[in-house]
Image: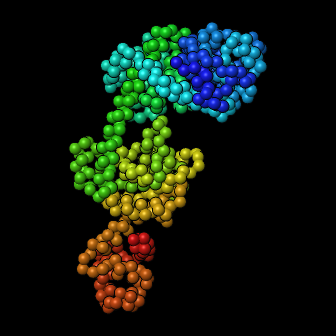
Amino acid sequence: MISLAQLQHRLGAELSPAAGAAVPRRQISGVHISELEDPTPYLEGGELLLTTGIPLAGSLSGGVARIRSYVERLVERDVSALGLGLGAGLDAVPAALADACSDAGLALLLVPAGVPFMNVSRAYWDLVSEAGQSDLVASLGTQTALARAALLPDANASVVKALAQALGGWAAYLPTVPTGADTETFWPSSTAGLIPQLREQTARLNLGAVHSAATFQIHGSDVVEHPVLVGRRIAGFLAVGTGRKLGKADRQIIQTVCMLLSLKAQQQQETHAAGAAVDSAVAKLLLGGHTDAARMLARDLSVPLPEGPVRLLLLKGAVPETGERSPVEEAADVVSRLRAEHPVHWLPAAVRGCRLRNSDGAVSAFILDAVPADEVPVELRAVGDPPSHCAALSRILPLHRLSEVRDALIEVLVTLEPGTLAVPGSGHAVDAQVEEWIEALRGFARADLVSTVRSYLRHRGQWEAAARELAIHRNSLRHRIATAARTIGADLDDPDVAARLWLGLRRA
């Protein structure tokens, strides 16, 4: 097992003994966070107990006796040490607490202000892993075999209900990112009202970044919450309320359910990863201009393709990997914080729901359904500093033109400042209609219509000047301009058409 001295040596100034005392070499069985005045029903002994001082701050008004009772309960439960996090509840160690710990022989350690409890928990598990004990700590023997056998489509709901019934209370499973089949599960139905408070307490204690169990109160009743891990990533939390002390058998049942939920979450992650790889392959074919091949692959692997036009979004910059949210969640957060001349409020939600995406590390491409903004729920921009990324969004275009527009958007990305989003209507936007016009002009084999139209627009429709530049007769120029207008299906003397086409030809 890991000793307090080992843990303190690993953390250095982030975990120090109070009043400069020596750190005992006593072994610890784990790290537990609790703000309860009596956390002992949820402790097995040997833990390093971390608190921000909420129970102690409440005890100060009641005198020294309550603080001594708190410390005595921890000693009777054989807690290895008490860790006090400064800055949230208390700014300094109460003298009564220091005296009580000294008299009872309980080691008192300090976590400085600004240091999250996750640092302590993570250091402990790193030491456990290095000591080759991780398999022993995580293994549940026969419980694991039973959990694997119980992996059914509705396993989460079944085991949560069974756990609540076995303990005679309520239970709830809260995934860190509720998506698809991995959603909030609870029993009985009356527990639904507790879910917002459970998430609030989880966030307040910063449990999303630690691997420790925690206890707290909701409506005066004790709640115990355990992390559900997949490797070192937290997939969710299992919360239980019983209204009574939990025995060893109760805790073993809870651990069994945690293992089952962990296996289910791992299975869903692997299934999702495999599906994302297939979706990415289809997207890559589309972006490479292999539309027919993409349609065949999508049909064979049941990947849904947009039935109508699409938009293409290119995001420059690596999407951060926090391990707590999916890549599309991270990308949606980045997009929501980009500045745009014409804000696209529906874009983060569209990115979050995007399946057809592909990334080469530096640039991520998202093929989005061309849904009008008024048909998508408006999403407010996230609060925070603009990221170092930039992005460009195309106009509505057919699926087979993704490859062409992708090349144009990449050129736009080069010109963008960090933290900006180029959208249709801004100076950097790619006009898909103009791109089609230019492509049609290029495809006319009997004359160079691109140069003809460029010269005609440059000279603002002056026949003599344009004909001289092109070294052709004025009548030949008139014939070519008429051919060009028929080819693109637009009047080149229309100011709007002329302005858009002139900008497109300059960019090309």
Whole-percent x, y for residue 312 in the image: 39, 55
Horizontal side, residue 455 vs residue 118: left or right: left
Whole-percent x, y for residue 139 in the image: 41, 19
Residue 298, relative to residue 447: is it above or below?
Answer: above
Q: Quadrant of the C terminus?
A: bottom left
Whole-percent x, y for residue 140 in the image: 41, 17
Residue 340, relative to residue 488: is it above or below?
Answer: above
Q: Quadrant of residue 105?
A: top right
Residue at image coords 32%, 40%: 275
Residue 499, relative to residue 145: is it above or below?
Answer: below
Residue 106, relative to residue 54: is it above or below?
Answer: above
Residue at image coords 46%, 16%: 254
Whole-percent x, y for residue 458 in the image: 43, 81
- Seen from the viewer's position, the closer of residues 468 and 91 is 91
- Seen from the viewer's position, the closer of residues 180 and 141 is 141
Q: How is the image coloured?
A: rainbow
- Seen from the viewer's position, the closer of residues 193 and 283 is 283
Q: Would residue 368 be visible to someone looking at this image?
A: no
Q: Would residue 273 be visible to someone looking at this image?
A: yes
- Seen from the viewer's position, the closer of residues 376 and 8 is 8
Residue at image coords 49%, 64%: 415
The total number of labels drawn is: 0
Residue at image coords 34%, 70%: 437
